Image: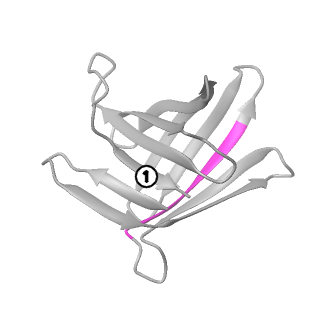
Amino acid sequence: MDTVHHLDDGTIQKSTGECHFGWVLEGRAIQDIWIRPRRPAPSTMYGTTLRIFDPGIGGWHIIWSDPLNQDYSRQIGRAEGNDIVQIGDDSRGLKTRWRFTEITGDSFHWIGEERAAESVPWPFRAADGFLS
């Protein structure tokens, strides 16, 4: 993957990385692993997501864990048109929205956004990446 991270001070960090996706728990969940930058460089982000579909809510329970950075998030994900949108809270107490857009058989565009409270609008800039 190629990533572009827009920082609060207006600077941009670009990097490469890896994403690996697969069915786990006898097909009951999807697990992915996100590594940045691409190995063998030392990791600055190394985390995993577990996504479990809940027919009762018509969506996915999502748990993100990056023990390298002590970064954790719980979200609910649903399809919105052709996109997948996940909304929840992270371990810093911020509201998070992660969007998967431009989805094809072998690529997608990911946009990660955060805000302090429900009353604050989502930012126009975001940490985002493209997997191909």
Q: Position of residue 65 (x, y in %)?
A: 51, 54
Q: Position of residue 53 (x, y in %)?
A: 73, 34
Give the left or right position of residue 85, taking residue 23 as reference. Answer: left
The magenta-colored residue range is 44-52
Give the left or right position of residue 63, taking residue 68 as reference. Answer: right
Residue 48 among those drawn in magenta: yes
Q: Position of residue 41 (x, y in %)?
A: 41, 81
Q: Residue at x 27, y 38 (%)?
A: 125
Mark 1, Cα crowd under 10 Å, few <14 / some 14-19 / many 20+, is many
| Residue lying furthest right | 26
Work out whether residue 94 can be spotted.
no
Give the left or right position of residue 119, taking residue 28 as reference. Answer: left
| Residue lying furthest left | 9
SS of the residue at dot 1? Answer: strand
Q: In the rendered view, would you say 101 is above or below 64?
A: above
Q: Residue at x 40, y 79 (%)?
A: 42
Q: Residue at x 39, y 43 (%)?
A: 91
Q: Residue at x 61, y 29 (%)?
A: 82
